Image: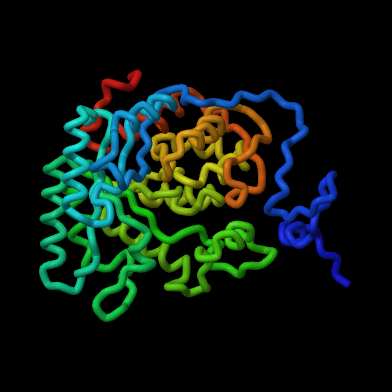
């Protein structure tokens, strides 16, 4: 009989007995480490930083002074709100801009705009989308955010999936290049979401707790196909700068990601929601960050200030074996990359200042 080595699924199926006799499942079992090592938890980044991947859907009406106070607490210099149009309404975009100006916070809060693919079958869709893009940039948008719904959920009038590299979208990509604004694009999701939900799937726990994230192998298309469509866009539009969200879902394969960066000089990357992948491979990740220090930008994705502490600790310290804040994303522990100061400065703010137009550089050291 084949001897099966212990795996995450085996542990999940075994009930663990606590000292008080209560039964625990693997989801509940999360003991503090007894390892004694130097610890340097951080609540503020060493240098002020620009978060290029944030979402503030309530920006037209929220108290932005409270938001900036929270930003100050973690040393965030500029927040880029990618949800400029919220759920697509012009009134949301205009309202967010007005609130920023009214609060005198134009140097701290920046908007990207968004486009809708709902009417892509209409003859004037491309022309109208380009016009809207130009108007939004004229009003103050600093870039375009493309949601993962393109390639996953957006369909044309015939019910057909709109591919990321659909030629009808080409005028949009080209116009971004002509306007000198970047496109922050999120395509697909982690590849394990498309794989069997079994003991070989490293996202087993996440898919158990978030079953709506599971996809069949070709739902709505294979993962590899969607990613290839995205790369086709990069190749076809070399004059446009693309910020590939979530390290392009290759944070677990840095050699391949390096190959892509070499292949597409117009591609930048940001590590929103994938810091856990980097924190478990500190030596390889450190080499990667140093080699590609001019191509990496700081991104987080969700706005919970306390969670940024883990990002700072991974980037700045040499700490060992400290926890991530979401067990279902990472049941493993984190290790610090201890990045050099000049690399930190580029990742925290210099690269963003270079790529995103008209940011206020005066609030950063140099």
Residue 55 picture quarter:
top left
Classify 303 as above or below 320: below
* Colouring scheme, one of rainbow, by chain, secondary structure, one colour: rainbow
- Residue that appears at 26% across and 21% down: 362
Classify 105 as above or below 325: above
- In what quadrant of the picture does the C terminus appear? top left
Can you give x and y, in whole percent of width and height, for residue 207 in the image? 58, 62
Residue 228 picture quarter:
bottom left
Closer-to-camera residue (101/315): 101
Can you give x and y, in whole percent of width and height, for residue 327 in the image? 62, 47
Classify 123 as above or below 97: below
- Residue that appears at 52% across and 39% down: 288
- Residue that appears at 28% across and 30% down: 108
- Whether residue 212 can be seen here: yes
- Whether residue 239 can be seen here: no
Position of 181 compared to 316: left or right? left
Number of callouts in the render? 0
Can you give x and y, in whole percent of width and height, for residue 180 in the image? 20, 43
């Amino acid at each position: 009989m084949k001897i099966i080595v212990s795996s995450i699924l085996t542990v999940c199926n075994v009930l663990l007995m606590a000292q008080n006799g209560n039964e625990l499942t693997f989801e509940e079992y999360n003991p503090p480490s007894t390892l004694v090592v130097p610890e340097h938890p951080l609540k503020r980044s060493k240098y002020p930083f620009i978060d290029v991947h944030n979402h503030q859907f309530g920006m037209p009406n929220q108290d932005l002074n409270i938001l900036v106070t929270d930003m100050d607490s973690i040393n965030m210099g500029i927040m880029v709100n990618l949800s400029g149009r919220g759920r697509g309404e012009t009134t949301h975009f205009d309202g967010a801009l007005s609130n920023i100006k009214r609060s005198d916070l134009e140097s701290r809060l920046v908007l990207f705009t968004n486009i809708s693919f709902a009417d892509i079958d209409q003859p004037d869709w491309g022309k109208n989308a380009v016009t809207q893009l130009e108007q939004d940039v004229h009003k103050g948008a600093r870039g375009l955010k493309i949601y993962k719904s393109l390639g996953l959920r957006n369909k044309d009038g015939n019910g057909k999936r709109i591919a990321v590299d659909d030629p009808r979208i080409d005028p949009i990509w080209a116009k971004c290049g002509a306007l000198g604004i970047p496109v922050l694009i999120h395509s697909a999701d982690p590849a394990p979401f498309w794989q069997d939900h079994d003991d070989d799937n490293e996202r087993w726990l996440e898919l158990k707790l978030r079953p709506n994230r599971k996809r069949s192998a070709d739902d709505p298309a294979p993962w590899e196909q969607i990613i290839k469509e995205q790369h086709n866009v990069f190749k076809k539009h070399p004059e446009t700068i693309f910020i590939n969200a979530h390290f392009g879902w290759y944070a677990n394969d840095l050699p391949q990601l390096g190959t892509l960066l070499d292949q597409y000089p117009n591609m930048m990357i940001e590590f929103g929601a994938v810091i856990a992948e980097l924190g478990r491979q500190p030596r390889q990740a450190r080499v990667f960050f140093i080699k590609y220090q001019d191509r990496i930008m700081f991104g987080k994705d969700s706005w919970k200030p306390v969670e940024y502490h883990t990002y700072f600790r991974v980037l700045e310290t040499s700490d060992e074996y400290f926890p991530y804040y979401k067990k279902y994303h990472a049941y493993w522990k984190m290790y610090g990359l201890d990045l050099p100061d000049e690399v930190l400065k580029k990742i925290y703010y210099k690269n963003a200042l270079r790529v995103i137009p008209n940011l206020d550089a005066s609030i950063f050291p140099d």
